[in-house]
Image: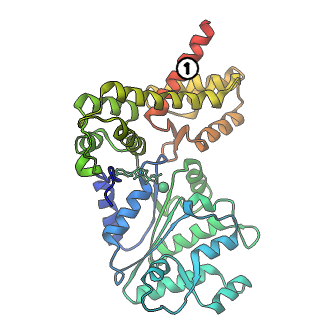
Amino acid sequence: MQYKKEAAFINRNEELELLSAWIDEQPEHILFFYGPKSSGKTTLIYKFVERHMKDERRFSVKLFNLREMLIVNYEDFLQRFFQIDEPVQKNASQIRHYDLKVFKLTVQTQQKIKNRQLDPFDVMKAELEDLNSRGVRPIIIIDELQALDSIYFNGQRELIKELLNFFVAMTKESHLCHVLLSSSDGYFIEKLYNDSRLKKTSVLFEVDYLPKEDIDYWLNNLEKESKISDYTLTGPQIEYIWDHFGGSIWEISTLLGQFLRVCRNGKVEDTEMKRIIERFMLQAGSYFEDYAGVKKHKEALLREIQKHCSKGCFKEWELISVVENGFFNEDSLRDELNDMVRQNFLYYNPTLAEYKLQGKSMALGLEAYVEMVENRRRG
Ligand SMILES: Nc1ncnc2c1ncn2[C@@H]1O[C@H](COP(=O)(O)OP(=O)(O)O)[C@@H](O)[C@H]1O
Ligand SMILES: [Mg+2]
């Protein structure tokens, strides 16, 4: 089956090299990926596994993408991370493939865990030791780690803390396996850092949107990278796309799909391109309109954020005027920002304690919103 457009994978050489070097060293720390939503963290992880971890005699990858799983309690966690070790059936390569991704249990062990006679982390450790003794390098990868936040393990202890402590022991202390964690939720990462052993035991790495030269390269090589042969883009069009979407890969990919529907004779007319992009921008603007509604304090906050966003990012204290003017107090401002992060208006970078709008289209949407408010005021 030939598609008119396929998923691209541009650059990420530096990141892939970092991962290769990390895997070649004895495990000493947890590696933690963070970055805005849709910056390409999951794709990068999958590419790395696909390219470098294929050899089952050398690597045992246990990859959990928690976005694809509903985990609301401890029992769900056990079910997702552990599986009864059925004897391998002949011609069951599909099943084996799944087995690779979880920790294996015998029926008896499972019962003991259920009865709380056995700690699941001891079971994990035993399997990791076994793999090491056979010369296989285990790698545990958990994508969207924040899904485990607020789940309790044996009553009062938080599962996430137990899990992190276990990973610290497995990496820094006993060097038994590599651990890669990933999350888009900056607040969650900061919280983990503030109240766990993560601080001196892990390395944070930001997977950001792609830089301009990568977007230039991609949009100049659509056939090679995205299998798009129905049209090419001109230099000024590529510039226009960069100005509106920056390195936001997912949005650009969506845009390229929409161009397929309007292209003629191998080209996309400028008017068509601008009309389509205008729709994106109107939508981004209306997100802010919806968010603020008729609430004056939200409107004030958005105006203040917009003032600071021209330089790219801002810190919480820079919004002090909305507190001084009585729109918020210190706590409610933090809560509001938290909400905006969770709704994907803002991206919070936990290492710099800095906020950014979630991509260039959001920045332009906010600009449009503020302009609309000003016009309304003028009447
Ligand atoms: N390096 C890349 N080049 C081109 N497209 C990419 C790249 N990385 C990710 N994408 C695309 O961007 C979208 C979002 O990527 P994803 O990995 O899901 O982001 P995240 O996990 O950070 O939220 C996907 O549609 C993916 O195919
Ligand atoms: Mg992801």
Q: Secondary structure at mark 1?
A: helix
Measured along the vertical axis of the image, is residue 43 above or below residue 248?
A: below
In the rendered view of the protein, which quadrant contains the N terminus? bottom left
Q: Position of residue 322 (x, y in %)?
A: 65, 24
Instruction: Give the x, y percent position of residue 15.
Output: 33, 56
Q: Residue at x 29, y 60 (%)?
A: 17
Residue 213, picture quadrant: top left
Direction right: furthest residue = 155
- Please name the residue shown 69% across and 64% down the image: 72
Amino acid type of the residue tagged 1 in the rendering: Val
Q: Position of residue 217 (x, y in %)?
A: 24, 43
Q: Residues within 10 Å of mark 1 (few under 14, many from 20)?
A: many
Q: Quadrant of residue 161?
A: bottom right
Locate the C terminus and report the quarter of the image it occupies. top right
Horizontal arrangement in the rendering, residue 317 relative to residue 217 (left or right) = right
Question: Where's residue 156, x and y in %?
Answer: 75, 67
Give the residue at x 62% y 62%: 148
Specify whether 76 is left or right of 165: right
Q: Which residue is located at x 50 percent, y 26 percent? A: 308
User: What residue occupies the far top of the structure in this picture?
Assistant: 379
> Mark 1 sits on what residue?
370
